[in-house]
Structures are given as C-alpha cells and as structure tokens.
Image: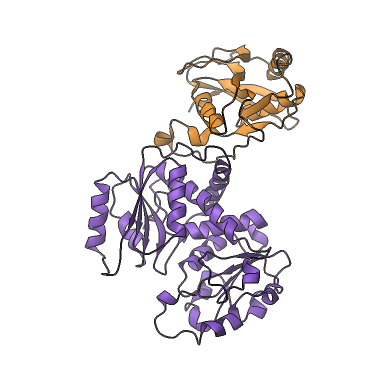
Amino acid sequence: MNLPLPDAEALVGALVRQLSPRVTPETGIIGIFTGGVWLAERLHRELGLVLPMGSIDISFYRDDYAKSGLHASVKPSQIPFDVAGRHILLVDDVLYTGRTVRGALNEIFDYGRPASVSLVVLVDRGGRELPIAPQYFGATVAVPERSMLVLSRTEDGILTLQLERDA
Amino acid sequence: MRNPQLNAKGELQHLLTIEGLPREILIRILDTAKSFLGVTEREVKKVPLLRGKSVFNLFFEPSTRTRTTFEIAAKRLSADVVNLAISTSSQTKGETLLDTVDNLSAMHADMFVVRHASSGAPFLIAGHVKPHVHVVNAGDGRHAHPTQGLLDAYTIRHYKQDFTQLSVAIVGDILHSRVARSLIHALTTLGTPDVRVIGPQTLLPTGVDRLGVSVHHDMATGLRDADVIVMLRLQNERMRGPLLPSAGEFFKAYGLTPEKLALAKPDAIVMHPGPMNRGVEIDSAVADGTQAVILPQVTFGIAVRMAVMSILAGTTA
C-alpha cells in the first residue's frame, strides 16, 4: 500500500496561513489527545495565541464505552480559560467518522457555553458517520477503509503522517 | 483458582479486596482518578459514562461518609442511585442476603456497592450475581475496605509522588481496621519500602508482620522520620472484652500530638480515614494543623470511586 501521503509539516504551515487572519487575543484553542494536542501546541505557538491552550481526553464521552469499556490510559482534560462566550478552535489530527468530535463538543459544553466552536484538522480522510465538517483543514486524503492514518511526533517535534493497517 | 475479582482476561470485574490485585490495576485506578478530579472542578460536574445504569448502595452497616461519597461518585457518572440502609440487628445473613440481592437484581441493578459487618459478604454476592453485574466492597467486617485503601494511596501519591522512597506509619487500632489491611496491601503492592504499624499488642492482629510491615509498640521509634502518618479510629463498637485501660491512657501513649508529630519528617502528612475521635487518637491541634490532609482525602475519595465504578462498568465478564 503506497499511498502518497502529504507532508504534515507543510500542512501545519497551510493551517497557520488560513487561521492567522481569523484569530484574536481572545481566541481559545483546545487539542484532542494525543495527535490533536501536538497540532494545537504548534498552532498555539505559531499563531502567537495569548490564552494558555486546553487539552481534552474524550474517554469519558466515548459512545463505544458500553462495548469497549473505559480506555486503558485516560489523561486529565484541562481547559485553563473560561469557555463561556468564547470563540474556540477545536483541533484534531485526523477527521474520520466524526464521533470523537461529537464527544469533544459534549465535553466542552460541560465547561460552559462557547460563542462558537470551529473544527481544525490536519487531514480529512472522509468516511463521516455524523453531520460534522471541518472549518479548517490541511488536506483531504482518501484512505482505504481498513487502514488508519496516524500522526506521530519525533523527538525534535517534527510531525509526520503514516498509514497503518487496522488490526 | 482464579482471583474472583478478575474476568478471564484479567480485567477488573468486581472490586472486593486489594490483596492479590496486580500493580498495573492499582496504577490504572489511580491514574483514572486523577482525570476525574478535574471533572469535579467544572461547571457541569458530570460525565455520561454510566448513563442508564443503576447503582444500588447496599449498606448493612451504618456509614455516612463512604455511602455519601459513593452516591456522589455514581451521580457524577450519570448513574441512577438507589440507597438501601438495611439493619443488621437480626443478623440477616446467608440465604436472606442473597434473596435481597436477587430481588434487587430483578429491578435491573447493574452494580452493588456493599457494606456488611460480616467479612466476605461482598464475595458471596459477587459469586452469586449475573455476569453483567458488578460488586464493589465498601467495607466488610474487619477484612477489607479497598476504595478507602485506594483513596489513601491516591492521597499519598498526590503529596509524595513516589511510593518507592517512603516511610509510612499506620497508628492505632490495627486489629479491627479493614482500612489498615487494605492500605497495607496497596502500599506493599505499589512498592513502598517501609510500612510500619504502631499500637499496643492488644490492638495488633497476630501475624501482622507477615503482611510485610514492621511492628512498633512505641510512637518514639515508630514515627521517627516517617513521611506519612495514618491515624486510625479506636473501634469501640467492634471490641469484645477489655483491650485497653481507657481512652485517656490510649491518647497518652498513641494519640497524635504536635510533640509526637515532630518526630516525623518536617514535611510529613497526617491522614485519618474518619470519623475522628478528637482527644482519643488525634489532638485537635494536629487534626486542624497544616500537615493534616484529612479533608482532601474525602475529596480524592470521590474521584477514586468514580474511577473504580467506571472501570468496572466497562468490563464485560
């Protein structure tokens, strides 16, 4: 399987260019663990956002808990700014079924009522099962159904995309 | 024989005792609890994990703190909670206990939180219920109180981080204390090198040293350079026959006063599972002092119980 995958670093640059005219000192950014947090860290730095960034683990909001149980390692969610009335960028690495974003939206609303939430993803791979669409995306990639598109980060912080076969 | 708490895949199906649980399971509960702690600081202090599930608090022994914190934990997981306080005055046991459980199961209980004066009662229930039903031991006789042991371990980790460097002293009525047993098992499983029990001979169970602890009858030696001091309540209601001259004598020898606390490390923390008997096992100056973490223990207890219930409810037989 030799699908040509885009360069993740170039996609980060593209997202920064799309977002920079839209952000203000009041903008809040929240990454979804793990890949979304890496991407949010980069965007937070390169967009020069003022508020500290948030990170959420949606394990407590997953819709497959009854089937699969609680995830083995749940990380603490942290949103260190007031959500109520704020314009928020919600960041994930790969958008697929939309179920993770659904869980993330529910979690954010348990912190307060935001003015708006925009979805930012590095890659949209299609295959949506819910009416969810990204407002900002680096690229669209057609990925075979039984494969996973995975973001990884090197020790020096370089982001790369890889294709993994689903077990 | 398989550990009755674990399913065929080695996952936690019931929480009955800390004894024999692998370290990874304890660590997972403590880590998960840390994530739940943040939930309780938000505007909406609830997550939807146990939506549609029914948790039955089955208390055959009186309790305020434990029952309330289990109830709050279940409600913060969005479960429906039913509280049953069942009198044990007629010593209802055996068939009657299981009949009660059968009736509640017919009301579609998904989880039983059980406190009982008889050691082993939660094991009996766990062995009886259908595979999708989970049992949490909320204290059985003198045997075990695993969620208290876990919340004590959580508190110690919160303030001291690394178990492998610690000296922990557990003081007082060890004989009647299921809290002490559960905490000792948790601490040794988590790699605590120095666990001490301190008390008069009459309040120490025979063979307590086999649990991997050192035994002291004197506070002066037992508290020296301790990082953590856990004070236990004198359980008068469980004492059969005279084990102590008087509460006053006990306080003189084993009550934690500022002078005795000074024997421990300067940054030692003082814990107590509650309810406290001021002037019997602990001096008010210590209980209300800067080294006491007795109230944070209660707060952490909710997060730990949320972690236990959400891990159990997500495990299939």
Report the front residue among A26 and B200: A26
Q: Is residue B3 left or right of residue B256?
A: left
Toward the bottom, the furthest residue is: B245
Q: Residue at x 64, y 25 (%)?
A: A86
Q: Position of residue B316 (x, y in %)?
A: 37, 42
* Residue B315 visible from this viewpoint: no
Q: Determine whether B146 is above or below B56 in the image.
A: below
Rendered hue of chain B is purple
Q: Determine whether A145 is above or below B53 in the image.
A: above
How are the colours assigned in the image? by chain
Q: Quadrant of residue B242?
A: bottom left
Q: Position of residue B161 (x, y in %)?
A: 66, 54
Q: Determine whether B97 is above or below B215 in the image.
A: above
Quarter of the picture holding the N terminus of chain A? top right
Report the front residue among B70 and B209: B70
Q: Quadrant of residue B188?
A: bottom right
Q: Determine whether A158 is above or below B115 in the image.
A: above
Report the front residue among B86 and B154: B86
Q: Is residue B41 left or right of residue A18?
A: left
Q: Position of residue A52 (x, y in %)?
A: 71, 32
Rendered hue of chain A is orange
Q: Position of residue B181 (x, y in %)?
A: 49, 67
Q: Residue at x 60, y 14 (%)?
A: A135
Q: Is residue B123 left or right of residue B288?
A: left
Label total for image: 0
Report the front residue among B192 and A66: A66
* Residue B183 visible from this viewpoint: yes
